[in-house]
Image (cartoon, helix red, strand yellow):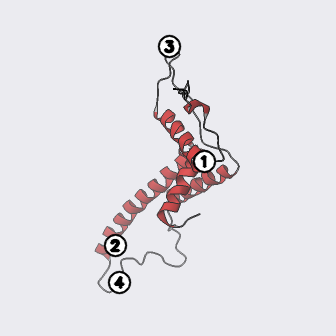
Amino acid sequence: MPLGISGTFNFMIVFQAEHNILMHPFHMLGVAGVFGGSLFSAMHGSLVTSSLIRETTENESANEGYRFGQEEETYNIVAAHGIGFTALGISTMAFNLNGFNFNQSVVDSQGRVINTWADIINRANLGMEVMHERNAHNFPLDLVAIEAPSTNG
């Protein structure tokens, strides 16, 4: 696998195409937990720093937050849950427990498909998977034209 940002993006696109990770509930919980944890950490750090600056002197560091044997925790439980759910989401993909797949999920009363973002993600996943290993996959039947163009003029 190539290193750098192009290799990372290639991995992310192929992983999405093969496992539909954006629709996996553990991935959703992990993203919400990591972002929520960073938000809570920023709010907590702002509150602690603003209160410490008032209570410390010039000879003390405002970052001296931990004392050996203290009873208060020094970690953020929301971020810990986010990291844990992210790990669960990725590790379930190893066993091919993929994200939700809504094939033509919304249908009107006449049976016509109403396209949603889930349909767009499914179509993009099929295209990415086909282009990833061009010689290993057949083109998906739902992307094939109904009638092939004539080659005999």
Q: Which of 60 and 139 is in front in this view?
A: 139
Q: Nearer the viewer, mark 2 or mark 3?
A: 3
**Residue 33 % position (x, y):** 50, 53
Q: Which of 60 and 37 is in front in this view?
A: 37
Disc 1 versus disc 4: distance between alpha carbons?
62 Å
**Residue 119 % position (x, y):** 51, 33
Disc 1 versus disc 2: distance between alpha carbons?
59 Å
Disc 3 versus disc 1: distance between alpha carbons?
39 Å
Report which residue position mark 3 lands on: 109
Mark number displayed over residue 134: 1
Badges 3 and 1: C-beta atoms under 8 Å apart?
no
Residue 82 visible in the displayed image: no
Badges 4 and 3: C-beta atoms under 8 Å apart?
no
Mark positioned earlier in the residue sequence (3 or 1)? 3
- The quarter of the picture where residue 49 lies is bottom left
Report which residue position mark 4 lands on: 60
Crowding near pointer 1: few (<14 within 10 Å), some, many (20+)? few
Instruction: Kindly identify the residue that appears in the image at 53 percent across and 54 percent down.
Output: 12
Crowding near pointer 3: few (<14 within 10 Å), some, many (20+)? few
SS state under label 2: helix
- Amino acid type, residue under disc 1 in the picture: Arg
Report which residue position mark 2 lands on: 52
Mark positioned earlier in the residue sequence (2 or 3)? 2
